[in-house]
Image (cartoon, rainbow, N blue to C red):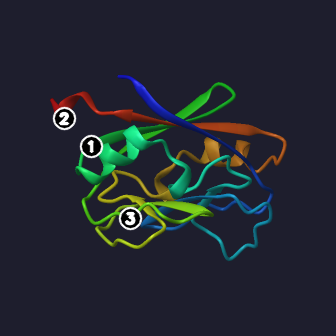
Amino acid sequence: MKILDEITAFGHENLQCTHSTTIEITKDTSLSKRGNCILGVNASKACSDLNAELKALIQKGKRLKITIKVENLMESFYGYGNIKLTLLNKKDMVFRKSNFICERTVLINCTKSSNDLNRQFINLITNPELEMKIYFELDDSND
Protein backbone atom coordinates (compact mmCIF):
# COMPACT_ATOMS: atom_id res chain seq x y z
CA MET A 1 0.00 0.00 0.00
CA LYS A 2 1.16 3.49 -0.82
CA ILE A 3 1.16 6.15 1.90
CA LEU A 4 -1.02 8.99 0.63
CA ASP A 5 -0.52 11.43 3.50
CA GLU A 6 1.10 11.60 6.92
CA ILE A 7 0.13 13.57 10.02
CA THR A 8 2.16 14.17 13.14
CA ALA A 9 0.38 14.64 16.48
CA PHE A 10 1.28 14.40 20.16
CA GLY A 11 -0.03 12.69 23.23
CA HIS A 12 -1.53 14.50 26.22
CA GLU A 13 -1.91 13.63 29.90
CA ASN A 14 -5.73 14.03 29.66
CA LEU A 15 -6.15 11.53 26.81
CA GLN A 16 -8.81 8.96 27.65
CA CYS A 17 -9.94 7.48 24.31
CA THR A 18 -13.18 6.08 25.72
CA HIS A 19 -15.64 7.31 23.08
CA SER A 20 -17.61 4.51 21.43
CA THR A 21 -18.10 5.98 17.94
CA THR A 22 -15.26 8.40 17.07
CA ILE A 23 -11.54 9.08 17.01
CA GLU A 24 -10.43 12.71 16.77
CA ILE A 25 -7.13 14.40 15.96
CA THR A 26 -6.91 18.14 16.67
CA LYS A 27 -4.54 21.03 16.09
CA ASP A 28 -5.47 22.29 19.58
CA THR A 29 -2.62 22.02 22.07
CA SER A 30 -4.72 21.62 25.22
CA LEU A 31 -7.28 18.98 26.13
CA SER A 32 -9.85 18.70 28.90
CA LYS A 33 -11.17 15.42 30.29
CA ARG A 34 -14.38 16.05 28.32
CA GLY A 35 -12.60 15.34 25.00
CA ASN A 36 -12.84 11.58 25.42
CA CYS A 37 -12.59 10.81 21.69
CA ILE A 38 -9.35 12.73 21.13
CA LEU A 39 -6.31 10.62 20.26
CA GLY A 40 -3.80 13.35 19.44
CA VAL A 41 -3.25 17.07 19.91
CA ASN A 42 -1.02 19.67 18.24
CA ALA A 43 -1.61 17.88 14.95
CA SER A 44 0.28 18.95 11.85
CA LYS A 45 -2.89 18.75 9.72
CA ALA A 46 -6.66 19.00 9.87
CA CYS A 47 -9.18 18.00 7.18
CA SER A 48 -8.48 21.06 5.04
CA ASP A 49 -4.72 20.37 5.03
CA LEU A 50 -4.84 16.89 3.50
CA ASN A 51 -3.24 16.63 0.09
CA ALA A 52 -5.36 16.87 -3.06
CA GLU A 53 -4.86 13.23 -4.14
CA LEU A 54 -6.08 11.93 -0.78
CA LYS A 55 -9.05 14.32 -0.72
CA ALA A 56 -10.09 13.14 -4.19
CA LEU A 57 -9.99 9.48 -3.10
CA ILE A 58 -11.98 10.27 0.05
CA GLN A 59 -14.62 12.10 -1.98
CA LYS A 60 -14.84 9.11 -4.35
CA GLY A 61 -15.84 6.93 -1.40
CA LYS A 62 -12.68 4.81 -1.37
CA ARG A 63 -11.78 2.49 1.53
CA LEU A 64 -8.67 3.71 3.34
CA LYS A 65 -6.38 2.18 5.92
CA ILE A 66 -5.29 4.38 8.81
CA THR A 67 -2.17 3.38 10.72
CA ILE A 68 -1.09 5.14 13.91
CA LYS A 69 2.44 4.57 15.13
CA VAL A 70 3.95 5.57 18.47
CA GLU A 71 7.42 4.26 19.31
CA ASN A 72 7.23 0.50 18.65
CA LEU A 73 3.42 0.22 18.91
CA MET A 74 0.99 0.46 15.99
CA GLU A 75 -2.78 0.58 15.67
CA SER A 76 -4.70 0.44 12.42
CA PHE A 77 -8.27 0.56 11.20
CA TYR A 78 -10.25 1.09 8.00
CA GLY A 79 -12.77 3.71 7.00
CA TYR A 80 -14.63 4.98 3.95
CA GLY A 81 -14.82 8.27 2.18
CA ASN A 82 -18.01 9.75 0.78
CA ILE A 83 -18.89 12.28 -1.92
CA LYS A 84 -20.61 14.43 0.75
CA LEU A 85 -17.44 14.91 2.82
CA THR A 86 -16.35 18.55 2.47
CA LEU A 87 -12.97 18.17 4.25
CA LEU A 88 -13.03 21.91 5.05
CA ASN A 89 -12.36 21.99 8.79
CA LYS A 90 -9.12 23.81 9.59
CA LYS A 91 -8.68 22.52 13.16
CA ASP A 92 -9.80 18.89 13.51
CA MET A 93 -10.42 15.60 11.79
CA VAL A 94 -12.86 12.99 13.04
CA PHE A 95 -12.98 9.32 12.09
CA ARG A 96 -16.49 7.93 12.68
CA LYS A 97 -17.91 4.44 13.08
CA SER A 98 -21.25 5.88 11.98
CA ASN A 99 -22.12 7.49 8.66
CA PHE A 100 -22.62 10.95 10.21
CA ILE A 101 -21.06 13.68 8.06
CA CYS A 102 -20.02 17.21 9.02
CA GLU A 103 -17.09 19.47 8.07
CA ARG A 104 -14.89 17.76 10.70
CA THR A 105 -15.53 14.23 9.37
CA VAL A 106 -12.67 12.69 7.40
CA LEU A 107 -13.88 9.05 7.14
CA ILE A 108 -17.11 7.22 7.98
CA ASN A 109 -18.05 3.61 8.76
CA CYS A 110 -14.66 3.09 10.42
CA THR A 111 -13.77 -0.27 11.93
CA LYS A 112 -12.60 1.25 15.23
CA SER A 113 -13.46 4.07 17.60
CA SER A 114 -11.23 5.45 20.33
CA ASN A 115 -12.42 2.93 22.93
CA ASP A 116 -11.46 0.05 20.59
CA LEU A 117 -7.80 1.05 20.63
CA ASN A 118 -5.32 -1.04 22.60
CA ARG A 119 -5.06 0.25 26.19
CA GLN A 120 -1.27 -0.21 26.23
CA PHE A 121 -1.15 2.11 23.20
CA ILE A 122 -3.43 4.66 24.94
CA ASN A 123 -1.40 4.57 28.17
CA LEU A 124 1.74 5.28 26.16
CA ILE A 125 0.30 8.36 24.45
CA THR A 126 -0.75 10.02 27.70
CA ASN A 127 2.87 11.20 27.64
CA PRO A 128 2.80 14.66 25.97
CA GLU A 129 6.41 14.23 24.83
CA LEU A 130 5.56 11.33 22.56
CA GLU A 131 5.02 12.01 18.89
CA MET A 132 2.68 9.85 16.87
CA LYS A 133 2.48 9.42 13.13
CA ILE A 134 -0.85 8.86 11.39
CA TYR A 135 -0.65 7.38 7.90
CA PHE A 136 -3.38 7.30 5.25
CA GLU A 137 -3.13 4.45 2.75
CA LEU A 138 -5.43 3.32 -0.06
CA ASP A 139 -6.76 -0.13 0.82
CA ASP A 140 -5.77 -2.66 -1.84
CA SER A 141 -9.31 -4.10 -1.85
CA ASN A 142 -10.44 -0.97 -3.78
CA ASP A 143 -9.05 -2.46 -6.99
- Rounded to the nearest angstrom, the CA distance separating label 3 from label 1 is 17 Å
- Rounded to the nearest angstrom, the CA distance separating label 1 from label 2 is 6 Å
Quadrant assignment, res 140: top left
Check disc 1 and report the residue beneath it.
63
- Mark 3 and 1 residues: CB-CB less than 8 Å, in contact? no
Residue count near mark 1 (Cα–Cα under 10 Å), binned few <14, some 14–19, many ≥20 = many
Instruction: Say what secondary structure mark 3 lies in.
Output: loop
As drawn, the residue found furthest toward the right would be 129
Instruction: Say what secondary structure mark 2 lies in.
Output: helix
- Mark 1 and 2 residues: CB-CB less than 8 Å, in contact? yes
Check disc 2 and report the residue beneath it.
142
- Nearer the observer, 61 or 98: 61
Residue 136: x percent and y percent?
44, 37
Residue at 61% from the left image edge and 30% from the top image edge: 73
Residue at 23% from the left image edge and 49% from the top image edge: 60
- Residue 67 seen from this side: yes
- Rounded to the nearest angstrom, the CA distance separating label 2 from label 3 is 21 Å
Inspect the image, locate mark 2, and give the three-letter code of the amino acid beneath it: Asn
- Nearer the observer, 103 or 75: 103
Which callout, 3 or 1, points at the residue further toward the start of the chain?
1
Which callout, 2 or 3, points at the residue further toward the start of the chain?
3
Inspect the image, locate mark 3, and give the three-letter code of the amino acid beneath it: Thr
Check disc 3 and report the residue beneath it.
86
Inspect the image, locate mark 1, and give the three-letter code of the amino acid beneath it: Arg
Instruction: Say what secondary structure mark 1 lies in.
Output: strand
Residue 141 appears left or right of 116: left
Which callout, 1 or 2, points at the residue further toward the start of the chain?
1
